[in-house]
Image (tube, helix red, strand yellow):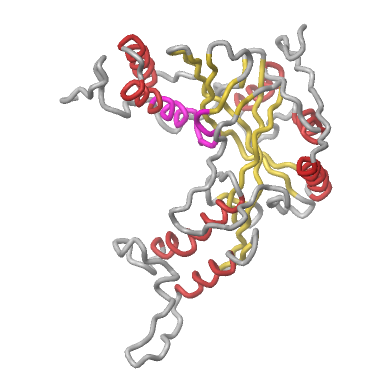
Amino acid sequence: MEHGDAARGGARPLVVRVPVEPVEAAVEADALDAVARTGNLVVRGPLFGVAAQEDGDGHVWRVIVAVTLGCPQQARDSLNSRLWFRAKDDAEDTAERRALLAAVARLETEYVDDLGVAGTRYRIVRAEEYAAVGALGEMEGPRPTDAEPLVPDWSRGARGPAVDDGLVLDPSAPVTPTQVAERLALRDLCYSGDRFPQDVLADSRGAVTTHPDILLLPPTFTVVERTANAWAPISGPHATAHTARRSLDFSLTWAWPRMRGLIPVDGPMEADARTETEGRADGDGTARTPGPLAAYAEAAAALRVGRVNRLEFQDTVYQIARTRRLLRWGPDGPEGPRPSDVNTQQPTRIHPLLDEDGHIVSGD
């Protein structure tokens, strides 16, 4: 067996790379400290995305739709749109457009998880989302060496890095000692317990054999709130802790005031808890008595003082949690959806019909 290959039921050898560059060595030391603080894991469930492999790429795949979606069909729909726009705007010739449109037609009517078209192989991929927790059940927060902007941008239109942007999946790439330890520890991870249906348990056990290798995707950051006995996510995964903080800031100042009737839903888009409480005075020039929006503005202001990862507001604790994802890998590449994975929607047509010249067909 050549290095980097694996037979069915066997795992690839892991190549260990000892960090010597100062920043990478600090990240490795940070990871060791995190194990001591939060040595337990909680598994939330699967996430889905799309990976692609070009002809001649060997065993390497690249992520083209972030592995953050809640069900396989959402990933299929994302691939449907990607191929439709490629057919409309970027097809080299009629033959390529015809092949792309045939793939789109399949995605509109079938549960397609692996598909080759125009020299590229596409696959719906499945990852398991999990997080580390401490002895008291506290979820791991951002680490000191996790990426943070030098100057935080809190503007509403700011755009941070995208999750999985440009991510290459290579099971043979060298990894650091802590990454090796985590991958080895998670190889046998599977569901257990009475709360899972039997088909889910069987698929989870089977994946340990059919896809024995583990790839660790980059960490993500999620806003969670403390419930009676657990942490519940209130935002999607973000690529950086700051982007997650900014999403909580948006909820505090813009979304929640509208949801709770404190700002009219049809009011000006720029109106938020800050604009509605700052610089407001009665007709005689005296300051108005602070209204309920003041509490929202104060909480958002507290969030902006340094790298705040925990905030209490209206008897609820919010935290920036560091979430992780593992992707299983087998002889044929990354794991796809399992038979027991649930689709929340059916395949359907998303875009208008195109003809072979890339023109939208009217009347349908």
Where residue 264 appears, x then y in whole percent? 33, 66
Q: Is residue 4 above or below residue 151?
A: above
From the top left corner, tell me how far across and down residue 98 is, in percent. 32, 12
Residue 84 drawn in magenta = no
Residue at image coords 45%, 28%: 73
Left or right for 210, reference 285: right
Quarter the N terminus occupies: top right
Q: Quadrant of residue 198?
A: top right
Nearer-the-camera pick, 229 or 280: 280
Locate residue 166, reporting x and y percent: 56, 31
Identify the residue at the far top of this view.
1
Residue lying at 55% horizontally and 21% vertically, measured from the top left:
339
Total marks placed: 0
- Which of these two is toward me, 43 or 255? 255
Q: Give the residues drawn in magenta, as a range.
A: 64-80
Q: Residue furthest front?
A: 21
Q: Quadrant of the C terminus?
A: top left
Whether residue 227 appears in this view of the structure is no
- What is the x, y in percent for residue 102? 35, 13
Q: Residue 70 in magenta? A: yes
- Left/right placement of residue 192 relative to residue 62 reads right
Q: Is residue 1 visible?
A: yes
User: In the orientation shown, which residue stands out farthest toward the bottom?
Assistant: 284
The residue lying furthest to the left in this view is 363
Residue for point 72% across, 20% down: 172
Where 213 falls versus 44 (above or below)? Answer: above
Q: Is residue 342 left or right of residue 82?
A: right
Which of 77/347 is in front?
77
**Front-lying residue, 45 or 151:** 151
Residue 318, quarter of the rendered image: bottom right
Q: Which residue: 79% across, 23% down?
A: 15
